[in-house]
Amino acid sequence: MQLKALPPQILIPLIVACALFMEQVDSTVIATSLPAIAADLGEDPVALKLALTSYLLSLAVFIPASGWAADRYGARTVFRSAIVIFTIGSILCGLSSSLADFVLYRIIQGMGGAMMVPVGRLVILRSVPKSELVSSLAWLTIPALLGPVFGPPLGGFITTYFDWRLIFFINVPIGVLGVFLATRFIENVREEDVPPLDLKGLILSGVGLAGLVFGFAVLGQEVLVPQWAALTIGATGAFFLFLYVRHARVTPHAVLDLKLLRHGTFRAGVVGGSLFRVGIGAMPFLLPLMLQLSFGLSPFASGLLTFTASAGAMAMKFTAAKLLRRIGYKRVLLANVFLCSGFIAINATFTPLTPHWLIASLLLVGGFLRSLQFTALNALSYADVEPDEMSRATSFASVAQQVSLSFGVAVAGLVLETMRASRGEVAVTQSDFSAAFLVVAAVSALSIFFFIPLPKDAGASLTARKPDLDDPRSEVPPD
């Protein structure tokens, strides 16, 4: 069947899906391959947390500019450029010879990833009739669900039986195909009246977020950055964020609109959701490391276990909306936050003797519950947001998600560093991983304090005004 024969509401989402699938697979295969990458680069496996945090932070810094760039230069132009940047970053990652190179190239990848999916979704919104929009977005969610399922086994297989560098080169043919299809079938739609970019706000927020999270991430990594330098970087980031808050209060088109926090549901979904995601964000870092370094599993065996969490998340997608309508958003959030935190903490009880079927089963249920919580949070965030605020709210929520995931990896790494430093040893032990799982689970549980003040009928309007419950960016890199 020729591509021209496909209607636009199917063809355009499938083209955008090429980019989304590439990003989803890439973010999942690297988590499984971290120990092998560290061994090949001659680095401490815990230090490879920077490869995860740098990518997530790059997404957070550049996402706010994606919508403005698409309006100013055309959605097709920006979408194609994003695919090219991401693909080039992938090639460079495969060629890197040191941790510094690898982290830099992951930042380049993040620059492309920050533009690909938001702008790709914008292409759909502007190219497909509103009557066909729901079905079109459904086609887009397919790679968001399948990518995390295939990623861990694929990354583990390539790393175990070939070379970890190959996992980055599989993006090349997908990227080339995406650029070709975008050039052939997508119109370069742009806006006539584009407000000026809040460049000052973009710089202040970008430097602030990057400094704060990066400084926290390198605490304890004395080989990479001295302790005083890590603290200085973190303090500088906090200062720039303070300057941004002052800037945002008097700027009409601030890149991150803090006024949105006046909505209680948005505040609960974004701030409470960020705390919850700290624990979830640590899982893709902690679990493969524990299975390979402590349990002695191969990357392939590790990937075959961890992908079950994404399978559980995929299963929940078909029932989440019904559960939320029947039980209510507040009840789901209050009860499920403890269940999800408990399923993070239960990883602390795993040992090399724990049956693999039991680990896989618990990860499957944990992924199922995690997806329900994410769906509730992502929907509730926009329950009371006005239509003219939706674009700014989406950018704000996306940045908060990526920053919280970065903090999750950083917190987990700091606990591992602190535990082994207290023993004066180099190797990471099973007890270190157990402590890390318990700490991040506790942080996730703290999010309940932002859900308790919600009114009983919070989110009731969502039954009449459906949000984007299946937003592909709502799922974090899987466990």
Image: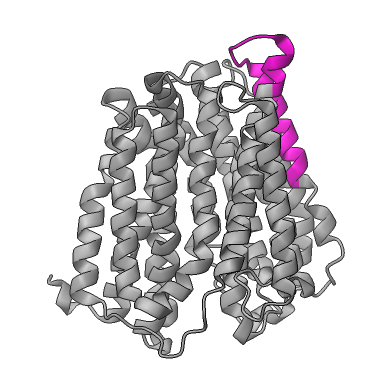
* Whole-percent x, y for residue 241 in the image: 70, 57
Question: What color scheme is it?
Answer: one colour
User: In which quadrant will I find the N terminus?
Assistant: bottom left
- Main secondary structure of the magenta stretch: helix
Q: Is residue 331 left or right of residue 240?
A: right
Between 448 and 464, the one lying in front of the other is: 448
> Taking 420 as reference, is 76 above or below it?
below
Task: Answer with the quarter of the image where residue 278 lies.
Answer: top right
* Whole-percent x, y for residue 191 in the image: 41, 86
**Residue 149 in view of the camera:** no
Task: Answer with the quarter of the image where residue 121 lies.
Answer: bottom left
- Who's the residue at 68% across and 70% down the image? 380
> Taking 187 as reference, is 468 above or below it?
above
Between 236 and 347, the one lying in front of the other is: 236
Q: Is residue 429 magenta?
A: yes
> Taking 397 as reference, is 50 above or below it?
above
Q: Is residue 79 left or right of residue 408?
A: left
Q: Residue furthest top?
A: 424
Q: Which residues are magenta?
A: 418-444
* Whole-percent x, y for residue 319 in the image: 57, 62
Q: Is residue 196 left or right of residue 115?
A: right
Q: Is residue 75 magenta?
A: no
* Whole-percent x, y for residue 159 in the image: 33, 28
